[in-house]
Amino acid sequence: DVKVTQSSRYLVKRTGEKVFLECVQDMDHENMFWYRQDPGLGLRLIYFSYDVKMKEKGDIPEGYSVSREKKERFSLILESASTNQTSMYLCASSLPPGASGNTIYFGEGSWLTVV
Amino acid sequence: AQKITQTQPGMFVQEKEAVTLDCTYDTSDPSYGLFWYKQPSSGEMIFLIYQGSYDQQNATEGRYSLNFQKARKSANLVISASQLGDSAMYFCAMRGLSSASKIIFGSGTRLSIRP
């Protein structure tokens, strides 16, 4: 059974803290993605990676960075957490686009509260 | 730039009726794929249906069909004979077909089925 695992379901962090959100997939997928989900705004892409050590900015990268040192792991980093980064964060993975890359697999989400 | 627009924030439908959820998109990619995902209150993202821009026929999966009108840049989801379990958020998404393509989502439609 395919699996995308996000290390933390619920986190509470203080303003200014450095926050790491980890995502691991066991499907040998090249493509991995980080989104945040907010009511009325849907899923907004923060960063994505199409190969190890490769990363591309999404639509809202400000205040975030990512790391992909191994194929199975994609980390989202909040360098200095702020209250407007309180949100639900979703990790996803897929094969490259094409006949086999028509399904995107999601983790269960990480609820982050910054106080 | 790529963009997905879902203009219906919420919809109420009587059980057993058919429902259409609207999705329009904008892209400069010559080839692309379109997805629909369902997110029930539990938060998991459930893949429903996929349509490639090069597909000649509209995609169907059980009670779900995708009304793809390429010239209008629309990819509406049609659910036939709605059930109470269809109550959820629905997201339209798109990706280009190059290896470094991102996947973007719309703001979603909350569908509520009335008994």
Image (cartoon, rainbow, N blue to C red):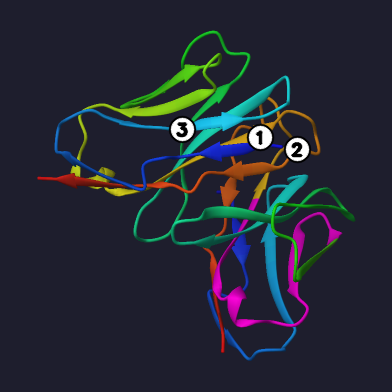
Q: Is residue B85 above or below residue B94?
A: below
Residue B88 at x, y percent in the picture: 32, 50
Please indicate whether residue B18 sits to the left or right of residue A28 in the image.
Answer: left
Q: Earlier in the sequence, mark 2 or mark 3?
A: 3
- Which SS class for mark 1? strand
Circle 2: residue type: Ser
Please indicate whether residue A33 sits to the left or right of residue B108 in the image.
Answer: right
Please indicate whether residue B99 sits to the left or right of residue B21 in the image.
Answer: right
Tag 1 near tag 3, CB within 8 Å: no
Q: Earlier in the sequence, mark 1 or mark 3?
A: 3
Tag 1 near tag 2, CB within 8 Å: yes
Q: Which mark is residue B23?
A: 3
Q: Label 1 to label 2, Cα distance in Å?
A: 6 Å
Whether residue B93 appears in magenta in the rendering, the answer is: no
Circle 3: residue type: Cys
Provide the residue span drawn in magenta: A69-92
Q: Is residue B54 above or below residue A75?
A: above
Q: Nearer the viewer, residue B58 or A6?
A: B58
The residue sitting at the right extreme is A53
Residue where numbered disc 2 is placed? B101
Q: Residue at x 52, y 44 (%)?
A: B106
Q: Nearer the viewer, residue B111 or A2?
A: B111
Q: Nearer the viewer, residue A26 or B102?
A: B102
- Same subunit, labels 1 and 3: the answer reads yes
Residue where numbered disc 1 is placed? B95
Residue B13 at x, y percent in the picture: 19, 39
Q: Residue at x 66, y 26 (%)?
A: B32
Q: Chain of mark 2?
A: B
Q: Label 2 to label 3, Cα distance in Å?
A: 20 Å
Q: Which mark is residue A17?
A: none
